[in-house]
Image (spheres, grey):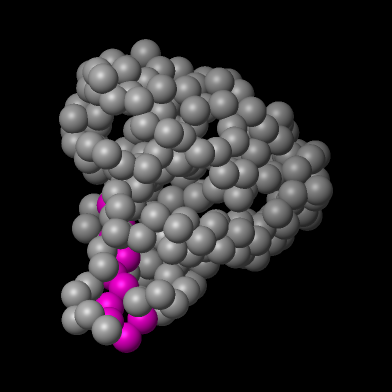
Amino acid sequence: MTDSVLETRWWWIRHAPVRSGGVIYGASDPPADCSEEHIFRGQAARLPAEAVWLTSHLVRTKQTAEGLLAHRPGEEPARQEITALGEQSFGDWQGQTHEQLRLADRTEWHRFWLTPAESRPPGGESFVDLMQRVSDSIREATVAHAGRDIVCVAHGGTIRAALALALDLHPERALGFTIENLSLTRIEHFDGPLTHGHAADGGSWRVSAVNSLP
């Protein structure tokens, strides 16, 4: 048995902005606006070489990953799409504005904002549901890529779920984080001598940056 600590470093990037016209898009698949070249250039320079690159299955994360890699000439890492890292589904509410929903179903809308982490929109999922699938996926990837750098281009909800896992937060507290488009959040996992080879959550987590822009 070794006394060394195995460190796995997650570099989370939220996708580029979506010009949705004010509608809720959630788990639907609109494209990203990747025109902010200076932010792409600045964030690309901060990311590690020889990293594993992950995205969700949604096009806006894949477009953002391509935009970042365009500023890293000669680097062509393998990329893996993980559906479980997708954004929260708002079900029947997707494609509508907040005001439309408030006027259409005041009771359901009011109930959702009373307990936003636990309430499920009609046909959708709660933030607690999102946290479960994201946490399972993070644990699996941390074991699969132990000791590596992992660049993951994902979503605001996904990154809040990752912070909740790392900090053992109640879901309502996790929703308090601001995660801007194209921001960087860094989380490290440490697998010490007593937990090496076990499930990822047997180790410890550290958050070193949240919502950081260049």
Tell me where residue 199 appears, x and y as whole percent: 47, 74
Q: Is residue 77 magenta?
A: no
Report the quarter where the C terminus lies. Answer: top left
Q: Is residue 106 visible?
A: no
Q: Farthest residue to the front: give it.
A: 1
Residue 168 sits in which quadrant? bottom left
Majority secondary structure of the magenta segment?
A: strand
Residue closer to the observer: 153 or 69: 69
Q: Is residue 192 magenta?
A: yes
Q: Is residue 80 visible?
A: yes
Residue closer to the observer: 54 or 197: 197
**Side of 79 where 96 appears, left or right:** right
Tell me where residue 86 appears, x and y as whole percent: 58, 44
For the point 69% across and 44% down, the residue is: 90
For the point 68% across and 45% down, the residue is: 89
Tell me where residue 5 appears, x and y as whole percent: 22, 73
Q: Which residues are magenta?
A: 186-195
Tell me where residue 166 appears, x and y as whole percent: 38, 67
**Side of 208 where 167 appears, left or right:** right
For the point 56% across and 63% down, the residue is: 136
Report the quarter where the N terminus lies. Answer: bottom left
For the point 31% across and 65% down, the residue is: 189
